[in-house]
Image: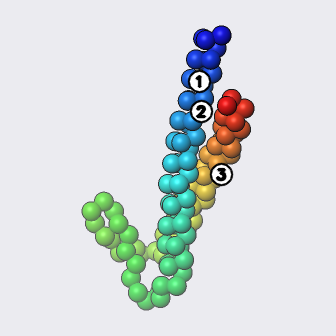
Amino acid sequence: MIQMDEERANIVQKLARELQLMSQQISGLESQVRELKGTIQALGIQPSNRPVYRQKGPLLLEVENRDELVSELKETLETISTYLNRISEDKEEAQKQYELEI
Protein backbone atom coordinates (compact mmCIF):
# COMPACT_ATOMS: atom_id res chain seq x y z
CA MET A 1 0.00 0.00 0.00
CA ILE A 2 2.81 2.41 0.88
CA GLN A 3 4.61 1.60 -2.37
CA MET A 4 1.40 2.29 -4.32
CA ASP A 5 1.02 5.68 -2.59
CA GLU A 6 4.64 6.55 -3.42
CA GLU A 7 4.15 5.55 -7.04
CA ARG A 8 1.01 7.64 -7.28
CA ALA A 9 2.77 10.59 -5.64
CA ASN A 10 5.58 10.26 -8.18
CA ILE A 11 3.08 10.21 -11.04
CA VAL A 12 1.33 13.31 -9.69
CA GLN A 13 4.66 15.12 -9.27
CA LYS A 14 5.72 14.16 -12.79
CA LEU A 15 2.42 15.39 -14.22
CA ALA A 16 2.69 18.65 -12.25
CA ARG A 17 6.20 19.25 -13.65
CA GLU A 18 4.98 18.50 -17.18
CA LEU A 19 2.05 20.90 -16.76
CA GLN A 20 4.35 23.62 -15.49
CA LEU A 21 6.77 23.13 -18.39
CA MET A 22 3.93 23.16 -20.92
CA SER A 23 2.51 26.34 -19.37
CA GLN A 24 5.90 28.03 -19.74
CA GLN A 25 6.21 26.86 -23.34
CA ILE A 26 2.69 28.09 -24.14
CA SER A 27 3.46 31.48 -22.62
CA GLY A 28 6.61 31.83 -24.71
CA LEU A 29 4.86 30.73 -27.88
CA GLU A 30 1.96 33.13 -27.29
CA SER A 31 4.49 35.93 -26.90
CA GLN A 32 6.14 34.97 -30.21
CA VAL A 33 2.74 34.88 -31.94
CA ARG A 34 1.89 38.38 -30.65
CA GLU A 35 5.29 39.69 -31.76
CA LEU A 36 4.98 38.17 -35.24
CA LYS A 37 1.44 39.51 -35.70
CA GLY A 38 2.60 42.97 -34.64
CA THR A 39 5.55 42.83 -37.03
CA ILE A 40 3.37 41.73 -39.95
CA GLN A 41 0.87 44.48 -39.15
CA ALA A 42 3.64 47.10 -38.91
CA LEU A 43 5.04 46.02 -42.26
CA GLY A 44 1.58 46.41 -43.76
CA ILE A 45 1.33 50.06 -42.76
CA GLN A 46 4.97 51.02 -43.39
CA PRO A 47 5.15 53.16 -46.55
CA SER A 48 6.76 51.25 -49.41
CA ASN A 49 9.25 54.05 -50.04
CA ARG A 50 10.71 53.65 -46.52
CA PRO A 51 13.41 51.03 -45.99
CA VAL A 52 12.84 47.99 -43.80
CA TYR A 53 15.69 46.28 -42.00
CA ARG A 54 16.13 42.74 -40.74
CA GLN A 55 18.53 41.63 -38.07
CA LYS A 56 21.03 38.94 -39.04
CA GLY A 57 23.18 38.19 -36.04
CA PRO A 58 24.69 41.50 -34.91
CA LEU A 59 23.94 43.20 -38.25
CA LEU A 60 20.91 45.10 -39.52
CA LEU A 61 20.49 44.50 -43.23
CA GLU A 62 18.09 46.28 -45.52
CA VAL A 63 15.34 44.03 -46.85
CA GLU A 64 15.21 44.03 -50.63
CA ASN A 65 11.96 42.09 -51.04
CA ARG A 66 9.26 43.03 -48.51
CA ASP A 67 6.76 40.56 -49.89
CA GLU A 68 9.23 37.73 -49.35
CA LEU A 69 9.83 38.90 -45.78
CA VAL A 70 6.10 39.06 -45.04
CA SER A 71 5.67 35.59 -46.55
CA GLU A 72 8.46 34.21 -44.34
CA LEU A 73 6.96 35.86 -41.27
CA LYS A 74 3.50 34.45 -42.05
CA GLU A 75 4.98 30.98 -42.55
CA THR A 76 6.78 31.24 -39.21
CA LEU A 77 3.56 32.46 -37.58
CA GLU A 78 1.65 29.49 -38.99
CA THR A 79 4.30 27.03 -37.80
CA ILE A 80 4.39 28.48 -34.28
CA SER A 81 0.59 28.67 -34.11
CA THR A 82 0.31 25.02 -35.13
CA TYR A 83 2.81 24.02 -32.46
CA LEU A 84 1.02 26.21 -29.91
CA ASN A 85 -2.29 24.49 -30.67
CA ARG A 86 -0.70 21.05 -30.36
CA ILE A 87 1.01 21.79 -27.06
CA SER A 88 -2.20 23.38 -25.71
CA GLU A 89 -4.09 20.18 -26.54
CA ASP A 90 -1.34 18.12 -24.87
CA LYS A 91 -1.62 20.32 -21.79
CA GLU A 92 -5.38 19.79 -21.64
CA GLU A 93 -4.86 16.02 -21.76
CA ALA A 94 -2.16 16.17 -19.09
CA GLN A 95 -4.44 18.35 -16.95
CA LYS A 96 -7.23 15.78 -17.22
CA GLN A 97 -4.82 12.99 -16.26
CA TYR A 98 -3.50 15.07 -13.34
CA GLU A 99 -7.02 15.70 -12.06
CA LEU A 100 -7.78 11.97 -12.24
CA GLU A 101 -4.67 11.20 -10.18
CA ILE A 102 -5.26 13.68 -7.37
Front one among 58 and 72: 58
Q: Do labels 3 and 2 touch, CB within 8 Å?
A: no
Amino acid type for the residue under numbered disc 3: Asn
**In the structure shown, which secondary structural element does the residue marked by tag 3 occupy?**
helix
Q: Residue 78's x, y, as percent? A: 61, 59
**Residue on which the image places disc 1:** 9
* Local SS, label 1: helix
Q: Quadrant of the N terminus?
A: top right
The residue depicted at 65 percent of the width and 51 percent of the height is: 85
Answer with mark 3 or mark 2, whichever residue precedes in sequence: 2
| Mark 3 lies on residue | 85
x and y percentages locating residue 67 in the rendered image:
52, 74
Three-letter amino acid code at the position of disc 2: Leu
Q: CA distance from mark 1 to mark 3?
A: 29 Å
Q: Which residue is mark 2?
A: 15
Numbered mark located on residue 37 in the image = none
